[in-house]
Image (cartoon, rainbow, N blue to C red):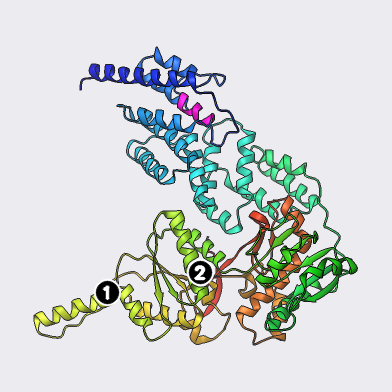
Amino acid sequence: MTQTTLYFYTKRVLSVLITILIVSSCVTPKKTGELTQPKPSNNSAQISDQENAKDYLDKASGAEPTQAIAYMLKAANIYNEEENYIKSLWLSGELIKLPLNNEQRFNTLLVKISSLLALNKYEEVDQQLSLVNNLITQFQIPPNKQYYQLTALIEKSKGNNVKASYAGLLALNSDNLYDEIAIMALWSDLSTLAHWELQQLKKLQPPEFMGWLTIIEDANKWGNNKQVLDEKLMEFQFQYPHHSANFIAEQLMLVSQIDDPLIKNVAILLPLSGQHKGIGEIVQQGILTAYQNNETRLIFIDTHNLDFTGLSLRFADENIDHVLGPLLKPNVDQYIAQNDIQLPTLLLNNPTLAELKDHQFAFSMKREDEAIQAATVLANDVYKHPVIFSTQDSVSQKIALAFAKKWELLTGETPETVMLEANEKMQGSLKTSLDIDVSKARIRNLEAQIKQKIETENRNRRDIDMIYIAAPTVHTRLIKPFIDVNTSTYSNSIPMFASSLSYNGTKDEGEIRDLSGLTFSEIPWLLENPWQNKAASQTSETLWPNRSESLQRIYALGYDSFSILNKLEQMKKLPYLRHYGQTGELKIGENNIISRSIIWGQYVNETVKEVVME
């Protein structure tokens, strides 16, 4: 097709498209509403924000093809702003069929992605984004603000807050325009990131990030102390006089001091008799360690065979102003069902039957949470092809499933999961999953052909770059050494990671030797680190030297639950406020659920120590 023919073909097709859209615009009422997508950045035509989609279609009808395409792209973007996503998707879909140049194709695909994203068509979004990224790579098309904004939304939909925030920072710095709304939106995202997410973001080295990190960490730590925070904010303004976050510093200075609530009488609901008495008493010990004989009055109530319907009257008689507990899930559900109890409450488990009320908060020690954190950290690292080894107990399977789901959401790839029987069949399953049996079969076949014994070494499969283990320590001690021994010297060793289930806090030399090199997630209470309350930890070890690591976690839960009780309302009103506890860095998440960020440890050089993974 000659250039002249191409010109007239394009003009004729555009004319048909414009006619269809102008006619449909005349009969379709304009839909207005709150914007849910970022405003596209298309400067191909000199345009006015006051005009609507039909105005640009009218302009396109008399313009040359290049200018007409620019006008139609603007119309498609406005359709998105008007939440008329179907029409925008149709228009961008028709435009992409035309012989566009690379820049036109790039901008058209962005409009199409914006429409698909609004319509929750995530598979198609990924397909179109792949085309956009190919254009960027092959033709060096510079990503624009709209590209970064859309990338941020896509990553957020996958739950990848790190990459979403990275794209948001690039979007903010993609032009020289001062946009207070965009700055506030970015702060809203950045200030809710956990410590480990901020450290991951730091590794990506986005523009202006050290300034953002400074103000975020100050707000995390000092958000409930206005005097100290204001001093830190003034230091920030002096250190970063031209930083975008100066606007945030000004806003934070306007926030009034939120005083600690007056806590006089706390009802603590725990199982102090019956089957779960032991667990309840350990939580009680943790609470009493954090209590330190302050002026608050503690009233312990045994939940074993407790009639929850009478609690409201009992609370009134005791002048209760705050509640801590219950601990067991059935009791949590019974407590939530008491609609006449309106007291601030920190539950020590997540409910299963109902949502939390506005005055209720929930704090639990689900190990699945650390699997989600691990999957995010490792997926954002260099690893692409993990294998999950899990034993078949319920806790291990929950950890493995949580890791696999998060990995698939972030990468689009389903990791291989191998369920191991905790018996003599375990080695067979490991051999099969690592292709060791296949290697041995090849060796036997070769020996049969040459009719002599040869010196060989088994080779493991090469398509694995990481192993995640979800298994108790006793089984991890079998899994890891077996993999080490059966990994070929001709290939690099496979990095192995695990949940806290694989660490029991022991100082046993044999265990440390068996698990050498294993990296695992853990709570600060069980691993020496800056967050650990060393005095309380040493006291606990002196009083209960033989307590298992699982019971120590429950003790830490009790300790943190009382420590955070007077900060709950502050943390709810100030989403950037954090509590650095013994179970991790704590923040108020969705639905008043407290989420935890934990740390990493590693068996190395005949000891166990904290390592920085992020």
Q: Secondary structure at mark 1?
A: loop
Element at label 2: helix
Q: Picture quarter containing residue 181? A: top right
Compared to residue 350, the image places residue 87 above or below, namely above
Precedes in sequence: disc 2 or disc 1: 2
Q: Tell me: 447 left or right of 71.
A: left
C-alpha gap between disc 2 and disc 1: 29 Å
- Residue 459: numbered disc: 1
**Residue 47: x percent and y percent?**
51, 19
Q: Main secondary structure of the magenta part?
A: helix
Q: Is residue 453 left or right of residue 579?
A: left
For badge 1, the amino acid type reads Arg
Q: Determine crowd level at label 1: few under 14, some 14-19, many 20+ residues with C-alpha closer than 10 A.
A: some
Q: Which residue is mark 2?
A: 399
Instruction: Identify which residue, 256 or 173, lies in the foreground.
Output: 256
Front label number (2 vs 1):
2
Question: What quarter of the picture does the N terminus occupy?
Answer: top left
In this rendering, does residue 40 appear at all? Answer: no
Is the residue marked by circle 2 packed among few (<14), some (14-19), or many (20+) residues within 10 Å?
many
Determine which of the numbered discs, if any, sits on residue 334 in the image: none
Q: Is residue 308 magenta?
A: no
Q: Residue furthest top?
A: 62
* Residue 41: x %, y % from top left: 49, 29
Boundaries of the magenta span? 75-82
Q: Position of residue 172 (x, y in %)?
A: 56, 37
- For badge 2, the amino acid type reads Ile
Image height of 89 relative to 478, above or below = above
* Residue at x-position 37% and y-position 77%: 483
